[in-house]
Amino acid sequence: MEDTYTILQIIARSWGAMFMLLVFLGVILFTLRPGSRAVHRDIADIPFRHDDRPARDTDTQARTQPFKEARQ
């Protein structure tokens, strides 16, 4: 009879590799599913969502005061 470590090692080699392959393929298929194009496009546009005009240059108080230390 084989010891527990060897049995677990055999299971991890065969079933573990199969499980990781199935998880990988599942993630790929979930990402490339037919209805996800609009979601991906919306997520890709997040940095440009409020980019219709340049930032205002009226925040002079933040430039004149030194940085505040995070730890007190």
Image: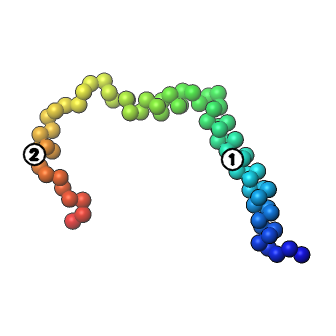
Q: Which residue is mark 1?
A: 23
Disc 1 or 2, which lies upstream in sequence? 1
Q: Which residue is mark 2?
A: 64
Question: Residue drawn 47% across and 33% down?
Answer: 43
Q: Amino acid at mark 2?
A: Thr
Q: Regarding mark 1 in the picture, which secondary structure is present there?
A: helix
Looking at the image, residue 50 lies above or below residue 62: above
Q: Position of residue 9 (x, y in %)?
A: 77, 65
Q: Amino acid at mark 1?
A: Val
Question: Residue drawn 38% across and 33% down?
Answer: 47
Q: What scheme was used to colour the molecule?
A: rainbow
| Alpha carbon separation for disc pair 1 and 2 | 53 Å
Image check: 6 left or right of 70?
Answer: right
Q: Position of residue 18 (x, y in %)?
A: 76, 50
Question: Residue drawn 23% across and 31% down?
Answer: 55
Using a 10 Å C-alpha cutoff, classify the residue at mark 1 as few (fewer than 14 neighbours), some (14 to 19) or many (20 or more): few
